[in-house]
Amino acid sequence: MRLSFSRTRRSLLVLTAAGPAFFAVPCFADNCEGLATLQLPHTTITKAEVVSTGIFAPSAGKPLTDLPAFCRVTATVKPSADSDILVEIWMPRADWNQRLEGTGNGGFAGKISYGALAEGLRRGYSLQCKSAGQEKCLTAAQVETAKQIYAGPVNPRTGQSLYPGLPRGSEFGWDGLDPTPGGTPPYAPIFQWVFGAQWDWRRFDFDHDYSVYTQKLAEMVNATSPDIDVFRAHGHKLLMYHGWSDWLVAPGESID
């Protein structure tokens, strides 16, 4: 039986597209194309169309096939001047299972996951997907800083890697690396224990100071020997894992 765009479905659309701020919207369009005229705060409806060919071709990637007829609504949400959140909603024209499925993607997620939308649509869901709302382009200085974090610290004289960089996908934890409002970097006490209370992180020499730091602490804190013969002799086995998005302890350190 064909389902009309009931008040329930239209309410789901508003909730999905722009969040709790839209509960106050009193009424909605009665057909798919009419949703293009919907007025929502900070939101521009960019397209509202019926897709009935059974095939949808994203701007990138392979065409998606075996799709039931659906209403496709796309929108851009800009709650702040530098935001650019992309939203896409697919609603089946028939045999809706009365459920809404929210889809997404990882990392900064600046795109729509069309494969997830297609899979849910085939199973009768109304679906929503949005990008993570990435801000506009980083400055050149910010890009260079990110590259340095990914690469990890190196000895400026020899080029030797001193510690693995943080992996892509760990960016949401980077705010924990910022100095405090008073200018003190995280984990300053351990450096102050080595170099004294007046240690200034801005003057840290990644050649000479790094050697002093490791020589003083290595015996107490380093556990870098791969020799587990005694452990194995007792019949033990060791399983170890490390999350790739760990922003505190670089995953590469476990490998090294």
Image (cartoon, rainbow, N blue to C red):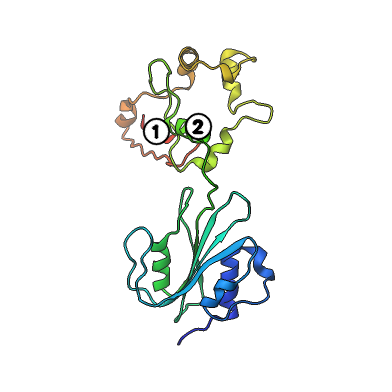
Q: Which type of secondary structure does the marked residue at label 2 adopt?
A: helix
Label pair 1/2, CB-CB below 8 angstroms: no
Q: Which type of secondary structure does the marked residue at label 1 adopt?
A: helix
User: Where is residue 90 shown, x and y percent of the image?
Assistant: 47, 70
Q: Which mark is residue 252?
A: 1
Q: At 42% across and 41% down in the image, what residue appears?
A: 244
| Quadrant in which the C terminus is drawn | top left
* 221, 103: nearer the viewer: 103
- In the displayed structure, 209 sits above or below 179; it is above
| Quadrant in which the N terminus is drawn | bottom left
Q: At 50% across and 41% down in the image, what residue appears?
A: 171
- In the displayed structure, 124 sits above or below 254; it is below
**In this image, 92 relative to 34: left or right?**
left
- The residue type indicated by label 1 comes to Gly
Mark 1 neighbour density, 10 Å: few (under 14) some (14–19) many (20 or more): some
Q: At 34% across and 29% down in the image, what residue appears?
A: 231
* 239, 214: nearer the viewer: 214
**In this image, 35 relative to 252: left or right?**
right
User: Where is residue 155 shown, x and y percent of the image?
Assistant: 42, 19
Q: How far apart, in angstroms, are the residues tagged by discs 1 and 2?
A: 19 Å
Q: What residue is shown with label 2?
A: 145
User: Where is residue 249 shown, x and y percent of the image?
Assistant: 48, 33
Q: Quadrant of residue 164?
A: top left
Label whose residue precedes the other's in the sequence (1 or 2): 2
